[in-house]
Amino acid sequence: MSGLLGVAVLGAGHMGADHVRRLDRVVSGARVAAVADPDSERAKAAVGGIGGVVVHTDVEAALDAPGVEAVLVASPGEAHEEALLAAFARGLPVLCEKPMVPDSAGALRVVEAEARLGRRLAQIGFMRRYDAEYQRLKSLLDGGRLGRPLMLHCVHRNVSSPPHFTSAMLLSSSVSHEIDAARWLLGQELSAVSVLRPRPSAGAPKGLQDPQFVVFETEGGALVDVEVFVNCGFGYEVRCEAVCEAGSARIGDARTMVVTAAGAATEEVPQDYLVRFADAYDRQVQTWVDATRRGRVTGPGSWDGYAASAVAEAGVRALETGARTPVELAPRPALHDDPA
């Protein structure tokens, strides 16, 4: 491919608008060819004067727009299955934000549809795999210097949750990142989930079980715990510590700017995932564009998206029942036998 990769961005909300900006101003080798959103005014605002972009309220119209060669899906999760299948039908490579499809049955349909094509088209937006700290931890664990990993201790905190957020969404939306990161870091599937429920924070909306303490078991015998607290009130924090046979390693303590004035020192705490993981998002999209222009698909695939949805569903059942819940995965299609 000699020219710029023409990308249709589906969804013009917080995430979609940021990807439009990224494709136009940060990433090389690509251009925004079309944007689709049910709210045409929101789509026009996201485009913000970028030349040569067509705006649609219909997904298929955007996919069929002149110059579209690839798709970035940033619409709400419930719209992802339709968008992915429409892109597959046109042979268009896709970068799809997580969750790939919120329910595991729909996610499995996507996996099976891609397998029938006989080639990969989808990369799923688990951007932590592109974060410099996570990549260093992955390299360290793969190198074996610390011995076999025994446990991962994870923290996932947000300033506040959106008005529509439910107790189940702490698992299906927030912890989905830890689910994928654990599978990737350890190279193992997650086999069972338990969810402990401390008393809700006074800062949590009425009826929201926040925080939660989630424990995953892996097929290889390691344990992964996640403190998820989406109304902590003070900042966006993500940390992960790997405890291994011969040592441990922790990420997420990287310091930001420290301001000293009036007899005190204060340190900035990121307030948003788009701030904390800005470089990871940039690197993820650039890697996707580069691979697509070479006719390749890399990174986390549709099987990873399906596995995350299946584990999250087991987590929701564990939250509702209070019981340890096994994870049930379908047989893995041949197309997806190789790890991403």
Image: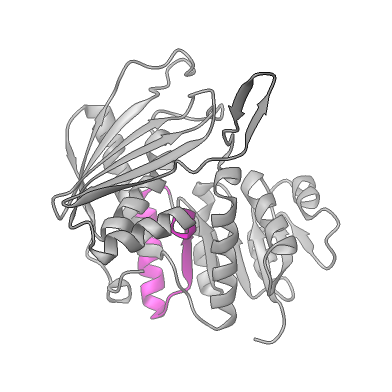
Is residue 303 visible in the rendered image? The answer is yes
For image coordinates 58% across by 76% down, the residue present is 290
Residue sitting nearer the eye, 295 or 141? 141
Residue 111 is inside the magenta segment = yes
Judging depth in this view, the residue of 325 and 159 nearest the camera is 159
Q: Nearer the viewer, residue 136 or 103?
A: 136
Percent x, y for residue 196? 25, 27
Is residue 108 visible to us here? no
Residue 195, above or below 131: above
Q: Which residue is painted at 41% across and 64% down in the image?
A: 300
- Dominant SS of magenta comes to helix
Residue 143, located in which quarter of the rendered image? bottom left
- Image location of residue 13, percent across then percent down: 66, 45
Quadrant containing the C terminus in the rendered view: bottom left
Residue at image point 26% right, 57% down: 186
83 in relation to 99, above or below: below
Would residue 289 be found to the left or right of residue 207 on screen?
A: right
Magenta region, residue range? 102-131
Q: Quadrant of the N terminus?
A: bottom right
- Residue at 45% of width from left, 50% of height from top? 99
* The furthest residue to the bottom: 2
Extreme residue in the left direction:
221
